[in-house]
Image (tube, helix red, strand yellow):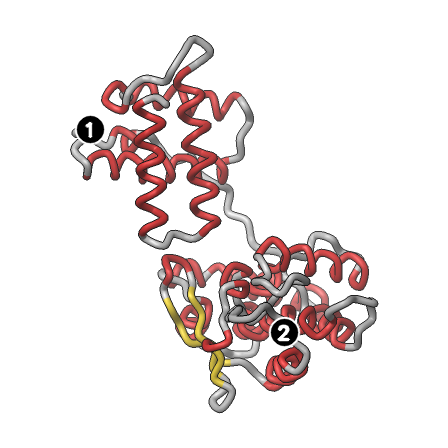
Amino acid sequence: MSELERQIERFLEELERENASPHTLRSYRADLRQFAALVAGPAGPPPGPQDLDALTLRAWLADLYRRRSSAVTMRRKLAALRSFFRFLVREGIVEVNVARLLRTPKTPKTLPRVMTAEQTNALLDQVAAGKLERPRPARDWLIFELLYGCGLRVSELAGVNLEDLDFAERWLRVRGKGRKERQVPFGGKAAAALERYLAERQAKPGERALLVNHRGGRLSDRGARGIVKLYATLLAGDPSIHPHSFRHAFATHLLSDGADLRAIQELLGHARLSTTQKYTQVSLTGLMAVYDRAHPKA
């Protein structure tokens, strides 16, 4: 193992100790290993961390452009590299974070595609009615009710434990990005889905995860994605619907019905209000569509 590869592994171990999410660890591991392989070239081991200068990093970024990597992908890879260089500076291995000298590629501003309230509720009603013959219909219904009823990320959904539920007050404790915790209320439909599911939940002894798979262990976020895609494809005829679609719908429908933007920010667990504000654009787009269809002077 080269010195650069060894430092990458040390950096990943530190992230794991700091409770970085499994998704972040997977992405950073893949991106940094790819970076080490690219700067090494076909001739041999990669240069040491001290040998990495701005020119080397710009050549790496140029290669990503040549591969036609999307701006979103390049931004993610650059974020991983900058974080790695911050670690190297903290450890005294390099003096300067040269990754900060790279310009961040701009991403086109796109609005998320959002299902209407009618489309969302029609799909959830079909899931609740057991339209598909599935071995665990109660669990599947609960997945949809929590995604839409609480606006959860799929990783947050998979991370919910039994002790995170407060049935008396209808609150759910959620661990979001960076392990930040927040309290999210859940409504009557989600409460009914929870009651039905818990009556038949079959888990391994000592398993504290709320949602379990067919082996009785914690349902992974990948497993939850697969369940959502199956129902969306077979019931709604739309395989593009994914767990985050319900988070978008949750925020947009709340905003459309008059909810305060700051309250939505708290419910979603966004660190910055600017992240939540994209839903105002979605609502405005919908309003303009209604105006164009209905106003005689449009």
Which of the image's four quarters has the N terminus? top left
In-image side of 277 versus 67 (left or right): left
Q: Label 2 to label 1, Cα distance in Å?
A: 49 Å
Q: Is residue 60 above or below residue 247?
A: above
Instruction: Tell me the element at label 2.
Output: helix
- Image location (x, y in percent) of residue 290: 67, 68
Q: How many marks do you count on the picture?
A: 2
The image quarter containing residue 202 is: bottom right
Q: Pointer 2: residues within 10 angstroms few (<14), some, or many (20+)? A: many
At 50% from the left edge and 47% from the top edge, which residue is drawn?
Answer: 109
Quadrant including the C terminus: bottom right
The type of residue carrying mark 1 is Val
Q: Secondary structure at mark 1?
A: loop
**181 or 200: nearer the viewer:** 200
Residue type for callout 2: Glu
Nearer-the-camera pick, 243 or 138: 138
- Relative vertical location of residue 264 with respect to residue 104 in this rendering, above or below: below
Residue at horizontal 50%, vertical 69%? 160
In percent of width and height, residue 211 lies at: 59, 68
Residue placed farthest to the top in the image? 43
Identify the residue under disc 2. Answer: 145
Which residue position is annotated with label 1? 94
Instruction: Give coordinates of residue 176: x percent, y percent.
Output: 42, 63
